Amino acid sequence: MGSILQSLQRTIIAGVVLLVLIIAAVAATAGNAITFDHAWGAFVMRWLHVLVGVMWIGLLWYFNFVQIPSMPKIPDEQKPAVSKVIAPTALFWFRYAALFTVVTGLLLAGANGYLVQALTLQRPVLAIGIGMWLAIVMAFNVWFIIWPNQKKALGMVQVEAAEKAAAARLAMLTSRFNTMFSIPMLYMMVAQQNGGL
Ligand code: HEM
């Protein structure tokens, strides 16, 4: 067990193996075997979508609940541990999780047969349509406002001190904006299936 958990890659593989074992055990004991049809394919897409969505919003909340409020409490000489090591790694997973959430979400809407209806906010799929637009705005913010400004703020792109401070502030405020959007976005995302709107 220790040899699995010491490696992140092996841990993720073990999680997938565990899932397959649970599904097989349920099929063997409760007898409700999965039929690998289109509906199951759409369901797997939903599962992948939720996985990457959790990583995205988890990291967004990590920045807002943990990293940003902690920075003023860290002595200056220790700040590079965050700005040079932790933040660039977190931002890497953050922006690719955002990208994959959008891609899997759009594929899911396509597989469910309502991509255009949702994007044009038709009544039967209004909740998911609103959720999708809120999340699309958030993903745009990640790639086109937060990431370019964070590169300046973290010193990955060299700029003057005043521009660096302005970039850090804009990245922080946009990150806050996304945290605000994440609350109605998640409500709308789960409202479609569960009668929340
Ligand atoms: C542009 C981005 C996104 C798009 C296009 C999108 C699209 C979708 C679609 C089409 C569904 C299926 C809805 C249904 O039929 O019930 C869905 C479900 C879901 N999405 Fe998203 N989504 C996006 C972002 C997110 C984010 C950031 C999260 C955060 C975790 C998220 C979490 C969920 C969850 C939990 C469900 C399952 C809802 C349920 O089964 O009740 N989505 N999404």
Image (spheres, rainbow, N blue to C red):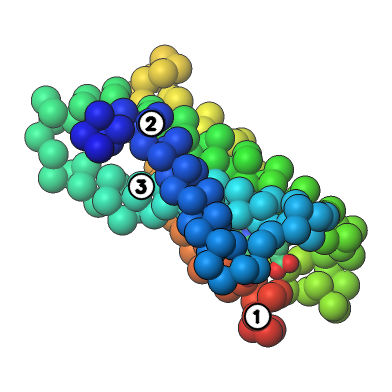
| Closer to the camera in the image, 177 or 22 | 22
Identify the residue at image location x=67%, y=52%.
Answer: 44
Q: Which residue is mark 2?
A: 10
Residue 118: horizontal and vertical position, in percent? 83, 64
Say whether disc 2 or disc 3 marks the residue closer to the N-terminus. 2
Q: Residues within 10 Å of mark 3 (few under 14, many from 20)?
A: many
Give the alpha-carbon distance from disc 2 to disc 3, as whole Å: 27 Å
Q: Is residue 175 visible?
A: no
Q: Disc 1, disc 3: CB below 8 Å?
A: no
Question: Which dot marks residue 11?
Answer: none
**Residue position for label 3:** 63
Residue 98: name its quadrant: top right
Pointer 1 residue Cβ closer than 8 Å to ligand 1: yes
**Marks 1/3: CA–CA distance:** 30 Å
Quarter of the image that includes the C terminus: bottom right
Q: Judge the density around disc 1: few (<14), some (14-19), many (≥20) Cα neighbours within 10 Å.
A: few
Q: Earlier in the sequence, mark 1 or mark 2?
A: 2
Q: Which mark is residue 194?
A: 1
Q: Name which residue type carries label 1.
A: Asn
Residue 59 locus on image (x, y percent): 41, 47
Q: Is mark 2 within 8 Å of ligand 1?
A: no
The amino acid marked with disc number 3 is: Phe
Q: Nearer the viewer, mark 2 or mark 3?
A: 2
Residue 135 is left or right of residue 122, and the answer is left
Dot placed on the residue nearer the N-terminal end, 1 or 3? 3
49 vs 150: above or below: below
